[in-house]
Image (tube, rainbow, N blue to C red):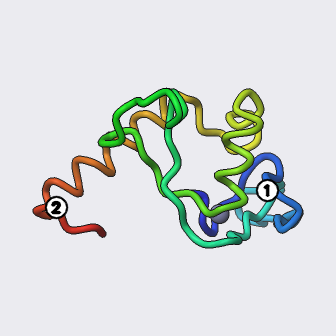
Amino acid sequence: MLAERLTRGPVSHYDAPYENLNHNAARVYRGWWHNCWGGMTPAHVGKHQATGAPDFGVLVPLCKVAHQFYDEHRKEWAKATGFTERQMASAAAGYALRYVERGGVPA
Ligand SMILES: [Zn+2]
């Protein structure tokens, strides 16, 4: 879910500093360009998988490096990406809903 997105902070050393001057808006957009690495993985929002928490509706697609950052630095995730835990949970529910709407066919 971070693919090709601008984030506030880097989630891995593959991410690159980004700066773009928008002349019309007369402002500079600064952030980090997220470069996915390691392939897409299903990341658990909220409780970790080891707790036996159910999978459905609590997964978001994250590449391997973003997933690792999310699992290891949960407290810094929102600051780096702008996604709060509530937004992550909402995104996971949205992915599950779309999956059901598609008749159980992955997007
Ligand atoms: Zn990524």
Residue 72 in percent (x, y) is at 75, 38
Residue 30 placement: quadrant: bottom right
Q: Secondary structure at mark 2?
A: loop
Mark before the other along the chain sequence, 1 or 2: 1
Q: Residues within 10 Å of mark 1 (few under 14, many from 20)?
A: few
- Within 8 Å of ligand 1, the CB of disc 2? no
Gap in Å between the C-alphas at discs 1 and 2?
Answer: 39 Å
Q: Which residue is mark 2?
A: 104
Amino acid residing under circle 1: Tyr
Reply above or below: 50 against 9.
above
**Where residue 59 sits in the image (x, y, percent)?**
42, 46
Image side of residue 64 versus residue 1, left or right: right
Residue at position x 48%, y 34% in the image: 87
Say how many tags the image has.
2
Residue appearing at x 22%, y 47% in the figure:
97
Image quarter in which the C terminus is found: bottom left
Residue at the spot x=68%, y=71% of the render?
A: 38
- The answer to whether 89 is drawn above or below residue 41 in the figure is above
Task: For residue 7, say whether it is visible.
Answer: yes
At label 2, which amino acid type do we have? Gly
Q: Nearer the viewer, residue 27 or 90?
A: 90
- Above or below, 81 against 29 in this view is above
Give residue 64's quadrant in the image: bottom right
Residue 27 in sight: no
Q: Residue at x 81, y 54 (%)?
A: 31
- The answer to whether residue 26 is left or right of residue 105 is right
Checking the image for residue 60, the label placed there is none
Mark number displayed over residue 29:
1
Which is closer to the viewer, label 1 or label 2?
Answer: 2
Task: Determine whether the beta carbon of the residue marked 1 sits less than 8 angstroms from the nearest atom of ligand 1.
Answer: no
